[in-house]
Each structure stands twice: as structure tokens, then as C-alpha cells.
Amino acid sequence: MIFSDAEKTAIVSLWAKASADVKALGAEALERLFLSYPQTKTYFNLSSGSQDLQVHGGKVLGAIGEATKHLDNLDTALSKLSDLHAYNLSVDPGNFGLLSHTIQVTLAAHFPDEFDATAQAAWDKFLAAISTVLTSKHR
Ligand code: HEM
């Protein structure tokens, strides 16, 4: 997937804000995932408001933050996570769009000025690209 300079700027600049609070934002995205799409809870053993939820939320958003540094090479940067989600966890690919959505809702709720239509389009493309890599080894 190729990102324009404008898309890269929109992704990196919003991440500069979000990176200050990865655990809380990640946990909120997961809370929203579990509440809106309860079937996704079956993959986890994470209770609402728990420390474990914060830790896992931080890992997920942390990986996304790392990916913002490799926009020209997401395949390689996310290769190990792709193996994990396909071979070890067997996460149904349909779930990635759900999490991508709740991440965007979380960003929109916390950064309403920055998350304008341009930023949303760039982040939607970025999260779709991550999802493509993380589901590419499912067979
Ligand atoms: C944007 C997409 C996603 C990213 C960036 C992501 C990232 C991560 C990261 C960084 C880890 C921890 C890896 C480690 O500890 O080495 C992880 C684990 C995991 N992910 Fe994902 N993930 C994504 C989507 C999903 C989805 C959609 C599901 C299922 C609904 C899922 C289920 C899991 C599970 C079950 C684990 C293991 C949790 C545990 O340690 O008990 N992931 N993911």
C-alpha cells in the first residue's frame, strides 16, 4: 500500500498526540470493541476496566505506533505480528475491520480537532493496510 505525503503527515501528526496515552486509548478501543461486538471477547480473557486490559491496549496501540515509522514497509515491520495472529491465534479476519473502527472512534473522541475528514481517510487506509498484513498469512 502506498501512502501520499499528505496521508503520511496526517497519520504521523495524529500519532504524535496519541502516543502520550497508549494504554488508556488502547484500552478504550478494546472496551468499545467488546461492547459493540461482543463476539470478539471470545479471543481474550480481559475484564472491563482491568489492568490487563490497559496493558493489552497499550501493546496494540504501541504496535500501531511502531507501524507509523514504517509506512513504506509495513509487510516487513509487522511480519512477526502477522505470524502470531494467523498461526498462533487464528483470529478471524473479519474482526480486524471492527477493531480498526473502534480505534478510529477512540481517536475521534479524544482528538476531535485533529481527527478531521482528511485524518480519518488517512487513518482508515493505514489501519486497513495493517489489517491486510496481519491477515495475509491466514490459510
Ligand atoms: C490493528 C490490528 C491489531 C494489532 C496492531 C494487534 C496487535 C497485537 C499485539 C502487539 C499483540 C501482543 C503480541 C505479543 O505479546 O507479542 C497482540 C496479541 C493478541 N491479539 Fe492482536 N492486534 C490486532 C488485531 C487483533 C484482533 C482484531 C484480534 C481479535 C479480535 C486480536 C487478538 C489478539 C489476541 C487474542 C492476542 C493475544 C493476547 C494475549 O496475550 O493473551 N488482535 N495483538
Image: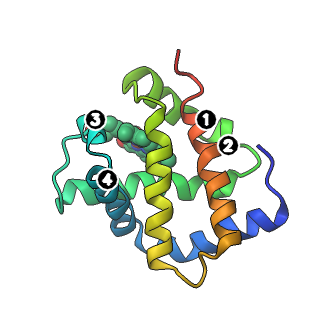
Question: Which residue in the protein does label 4 denote?
Answer: 36
Q: Which residue sits at x=43%, y=67%? A: 106
CB within 8 Å, label 2 to label 1: yes
Q: Is residue 9 above or below residue 98?
A: below
Q: Amino acid at mark 3?
A: Tyr
Distance, label 3 to label 4, CA atoms, is 15 Å
In this view, the mark in front (4 or 1)? 4
Q: Which residue sits at x=71%, y=70%? A: 118
Q: Secondary structure at mark 4?
A: helix
Q: Is the residue marked by circle 1 packed among few (<14), some (14-19), or many (20+) residues within 10 Å?
A: many
Camera-nearest residue between 1 and 58:
1
Q: Amino acid at mark 1?
A: Val
Q: Secondary structure at mark 3?
A: helix
Q: Which residue extends farthest right? A: 5
Q: Which mark is residue 133?
A: 1
Q: Is residue 138 above or below residue 9?
A: above
Q: Amino acid at mark 2?
A: Leu
Instruction: Report the image quarter containing ligand 1.
Output: top left
The answer to whether the beta carbon of the residue marked 3 is less than 8 Å from any atom of ligand 1 is yes
In this view, the mark in front (3 or 2)? 3
The answer to whether the beta carbon of the residue marked 1 is less than 8 Å from any atom of ligand 1 is no
